[in-house]
Amino acid sequence: MKYLLFWFGVLCSSSVYAETFHADAQYCLVCHGSNAQGNEAISAPNLAILPDWYLSSQIQAFQSGWRGHQTTDAYSKEMMAVAKSMSAEDVKRAIGFITGFQVSKTPETLTGDETHGKTLYQTCAACHGAAAEGNQAMGAPPLAGQYSWYLLRQLQAYRSGQRGAAENDSRGAMMKQIAATLQQDQDLNDLVAYINTLDIQKTNNPKTDIKK
Amino acid sequence: MTNPDHKQINNKQLSRREALLLLGKVGGSAAMLQAAGLFGLFAAPVQAQPELVKLKPLTAGRKTVLILGAGISGLVAAYELGKAGYQCKILEASHRAGGRNLTIRHGDFIDELGNPQFCHFDKDPDLYFNAGPARIPAHHTAILHYCREFAVEMQMFCNYNKNCYTQDDNAFGGKPVRIREYEADTRGFFSELMAKSIQAEAKLDAPFDDIDRQKLIEFCKAYGDLSSDFTYEGSERAGYQSGGILSPGVLKKPRAFADLLQSNFWAGAMHFGEISDQAAALMTPVGGMDKIVDAFLSRLAGKVQLKAQVQKVQLLPQGVEVSYWLDGQLQTEQADYCLNCIPAQLMAGIENNFPADYVGVMRQLQRGKLSKIALQAKERFWEKEQIYSGISWTNQDITQIWYPSHGLFKTKGILLGAYSWDPAISDRFSAMTNQERIAAAITQGSKLHSDYGKYIDQGNSVCWQRMNHMLGCGAVWSEELLKTSFATIQAPVGGHYMVGDQVSYHPGWQEGAVRSAWYAMESIQQQEQQKQRQVAV
Ligand SMILES: Cc1cc2nc3c(=O)[nH]c(=O)nc-3n(C[C@H](O)[C@H](O)[C@H](O)COP(=O)(O)OP(=O)(O)OC[C@H]3O[C@@H](n4cnc5c(N)ncnc54)[C@H](O)[C@@H]3O)c2cc1C
């Protein structure tokens, strides 16, 4: 793994140290896995597949309490607490650090009607891309390479209004509307089973190798 | 039955069946108590295991060992293997060694993710709190072996004090009641019921004969402090209402049995001190549990690398390779053996080439959730209430209040203002800031001690499921998983061993951590002896 860890020197200033004690962003890996690939045992998703603009938008969402505040689930509260304890510098440093990892994912086997999922996915493709590679213009993240347990939980969260319902969360609101149309749990499952068959893409970070 | 209050239970109408039903409920409560889990979910008594680890000195060659995590198990391993001539190095991710063995005092940093805190308790050797382990029972002979070997100064630790309170919002108008009183009265009424229902039977079923029957009735009398006609009329065990020294003691009026049963105390906390790991007499190091860690560290100079976060563990055809972050750079080292006490739920997220079933077990272990809140009191107000050490219990989220077993009669003291093992409660505390947690602890504690808030200076809190490099208070094994998978995780893969209390039937206790390390080291020794034999052939 090749890193250019230029931010380490810059940010070891004593104020940051005193505020968070974390002079680096390695603590993201404690929850999200050593390659930012996600860790089911902690319920923390794959970050390595996510582009900088989306990482940034979601840290903002957690910091503003759009994600995590009204929720009952402990997972988003956990990430919200972390985001809220981060300074603007911390966020910048963390995003630089996370986007430096090669994308990877622990293989999952998922049972579901992939053909049906593919049909349903046509609606999603408009925003998330045909290969679920994400689309910055739409604010829609890549889904390929994300864990099924996480995708399912998010779709349920949008559907129940735990995500995407906060007042200023316009991107979340967009996705919430879509999720509302997916009433059948089986549909969610089939969709996710189909997404699970797609190869990991990483379009925004051409410097990193793609490994699956 | 003397029952001055309303809601009389007329025992004459209670058939033996009903009495036994009641008994059954109480029996059920013992089951509930076990289910409540407390900490040390597996409350099965530990057999005395007097044998100690005995490693023979290495005779041939140089053997290297990488130890991942400076938890108690890692420290034990480095110490013992070092003595036997192995070259050891501990890689520890945190800024401190000790893992869950954590004592908080003036100036300490609490590395809770999303809620970093510093401790501002006064600088005073008595003003500390054990955020993790706090007590050691006598049958935990392995951890006590090191306390003895290192001459760690020990004191007694009190878990059970009859002068503490039980408070339940659903009983006695939410007012606290001394445990002394609650226990004397419940036992009294319970014994009376039993004695009278046994008397009412013409004949007891086998195996009781007439002599047994008389003994059983006498047992009830002794157990409940009944009067000569087997009635409970109050007992000095509950403490006197007045007098007792220069004037005759006046008994307290017993509380109504029905009221006593309204409280949930009988269903769990009342029997806490009966659990083998929690029963008197317990011990703790003077000055904080981390004195044990200090004792190890003073014998491991130069062997512990702090702030070294393991990133990758690779099994090699011979030995193990470990990569870790140090000062922003990735470092790589190889060794013949690797002992790993990184919590399984974190190890599941660390790159490795372990067999699928081995990591599979790590993924299935659940994160335990425990929270503790410590409060610095300006004045030891509890001493004025005749409380010196012990635990008060409440059905509010704070669950317990611990009074220090040390520093008697000093001005200030550190209370444990909350200690809960219910995951839902821990979720609620973890969603709060430190200030909110302290405020909640004070509000709830005020139901046990009036003017509570007036005495509290400040506080700190630790939610173990959020602590950096831990993210849990300990591994939670389901019974099923223990049956199917314990052996998988206990066995080595090549030169790699998982250790820690997570690889014991006693997670949540340092004893489990020490013995897991001993187990692994003995296995390493066997591997070595085998190799030597092969060379000799
Ligand atoms: C609230 C609470 C109360 C308890 N009460 C008692 C009690 O009264 N009596 C008792 O005997 N026991 C008690 N225990 C249990 C006791 O704390 C544990 O059994 C013991 O400390 C566990 O030691 P361990 O060796 O398993 O390692 P741990 O303490 O789990 O240490 C693991 C180590 O691995 C390190 N680590 C994690 N990730 C990495 C990485 N990537 N790279 C390098 N290092 C890493 C961690 O920082 C940590 O130091 C209690 C625990 C808790 C939480």
Image (cartoon, rainbow, N blue to C red):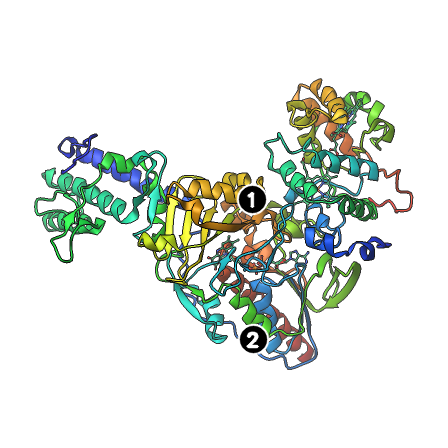
Disc 2 Cβ-to-ligand 1 distance below 8 Å: no
Q: Residue at x 84, y 23 (%)?
A: A126
Residue A72 at x, y percent in the picture: 59, 32
The relative height of residue B114 versus residue A6 in the rendered view (above or below) is above
Residue B195 at x, y percent in the picture: 15, 43
Please state if A88 lies on the left or on the right of B184 as rendered: right
Chain letter belonging to callout 1 = B
Which amino acid does the dot numbered 2 rest on? Leu
Point out the frontmost of discs 2 and 1: 1
Determine the image quadrant of residue B329: bottom right
Q: Quadrant of the N terminus of chain B?
A: top left
Which amino acid does the dot numbered 1 rest on? Gln
User: Can residue B158 be seen in the rendering of this structure?
Assistant: yes
Please state if B334 lies on the left or on the right of A7 as rendered: left
Crowd class of label 2 (few under 14; some 14 to 19; many from 20; radius 10 Å) = some
Marks 2 and 1 share the same chain: yes
Whichever of callouts 2 and 1 sits on the residue coming sooner in the sequence is 2
Residue B56 at x, y percent in the picture: 57, 78
Question: Which numbered dot is residue B55?
Answer: 2
Label 1 belongs to which residue? B435
Q: Residue at x 49, y 71 (%)?
A: B146
The relative height of residue B529 versus residue A119 in the rendered view (above or below) is below
Chain letter belonging to callout 2 = B
**Viewer-side residue, A1 vs B486:** A1
Spatial CA distance of label 2 from label 1 is 49 Å
